[in-house]
């Protein structure tokens, strides 16, 4: 039977489950029990250790997996596209630093500052459906939501002039048009080798 759970965040921090305020430890423990029942959060993988060796690891973190999914959903509602893209990129480096034990480093502190700067609007509630190992987002709300239903439309002319999109498409696709006009392949590996004999030396 599917189970639904609501997680509340304040400035990026999880503070409540199903309306009940909990300490961080209590919150993770609660989600561990809920997620474990539904087979969520088990990872079987081969890792590349810092020293170069491979290791086989099996991890179970139902609560952490649920929190990550909920947090990501809330960020998708309140953060702009470029911030989300860079945060996804920076998250990989952050995880690498933590895994390698580089906690007290200038780069780690710089990334902490970036995280702090982005988490202010990550406030709200996310509703998830848990079922047979799956985490399915079914609802999200925030006082800092960037989503507006009246703007997320392609049919109403009063939101913006639909003809404006035509000029944008022409400009956005210009690099591809130039590549096609010059008969250049899309993949770099398919590029013709240059004839260096045509270039004169000084």
Image (tube, rainbow, N blue to C red):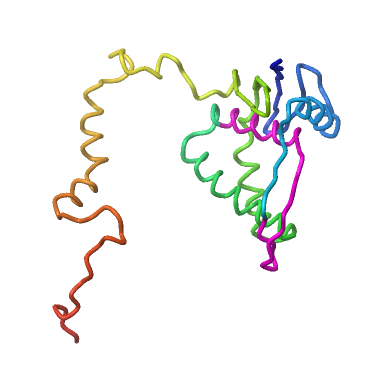
The relative height of residue 147 versus residue 193 in the rendered view (above or below) is above
The magenta-colored residue range is 47-75
Give residue 52's position: percent from left, percent from top: 66, 67
The residue that appears at 69% across and 17% down in the rendered structure is 2
Q: Is residue 1 left or right of residue 91?
A: right
Viewer-nearest residue: 130 or 128: 130
Looking at this view, name the residue that lies furthest to the bottom: 202
Quarter of the image for the N terminus: give it.
top right
The residue that appears at 67% across and 57% down in the rendered structure is 97
Give residue 189's position: percent from left, percent from top: 31, 61
The relative height of residue 61 versus residue 146 in the rendered view (above or below) is below
The residue that appears at 72% across and 36% down in the rendered structure is 41
The relative height of residue 100 versus residue 82 in the rendered view (above or below) is below
Quarter of the image for the C terminus: give it.
bottom left
Magenta stretch contains residue 156: no
Viewer-nearest residue: 187 or 167: 187
Give residue 195's position: percent from left, percent from top: 18, 75
Q: Which of the 4 image quarters holds residue 174?
A: top left
Give residue 145's position: percent from left, percent from top: 54, 23
Q: Is residue 158 left or right of residue 69?
A: left
Q: Is residue 45 left or right of residue 26?
A: left
Q: Is residue 51 left or right of residue 184?
A: right
The residue that appears at 75% across and 44% down in the rendered structure is 59
Viewer-nearest residue: 100 or 149: 100
Q: Which of the 4 image quarters holds residue 26?
A: top right
Magenta stretch contains residue 60: yes
The relative height of residue 3 versus residue 108 in the rendered view (above or below) is above
- How many marks do you count on the picture? 0
């Amino acid at each position: 039977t599917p189970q639904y759970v609501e997680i509340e965040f304040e400035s990026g921090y999880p503070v409540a489950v199903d309306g009940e305020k909990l300490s961080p430890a209590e919150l993770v423990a609660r989600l561990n029990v809920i997620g474990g029942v539904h087979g969520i959060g088990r990872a079987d993988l081969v890792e590349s250790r810092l020293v170069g060796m491979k290791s086989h690891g099996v991890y179970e973190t139902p609560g952490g997996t649920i929190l990550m999914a909920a947090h990501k959903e809330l960020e998708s509602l309140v953060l702009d596209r470029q911030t989300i893209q860079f945060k996804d990129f920076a998250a990989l480096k952050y995880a690498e630093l933590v895994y390698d034990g580089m906690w007290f480093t200038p780069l780690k502190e710089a990334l902490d500052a970036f995280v702090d700067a982005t988490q202010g609007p990550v406030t709200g509630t996310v509703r998830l459906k848990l079922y047979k190992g799956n985490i399915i987002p079914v609802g999200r709300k925030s006082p800092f939501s960037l989503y507006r239903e009246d703007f997320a439309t392609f049919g109403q002319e009063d939101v913006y002039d639909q003809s404006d999109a035509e000029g944008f498409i022409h400009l956005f696709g210009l690099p591809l048009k130039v590549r096609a006009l010059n008969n250049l392949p899309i993949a770099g590996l398919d590029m013709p080798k240059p004839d260096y004999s045509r270039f004169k030396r000084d």
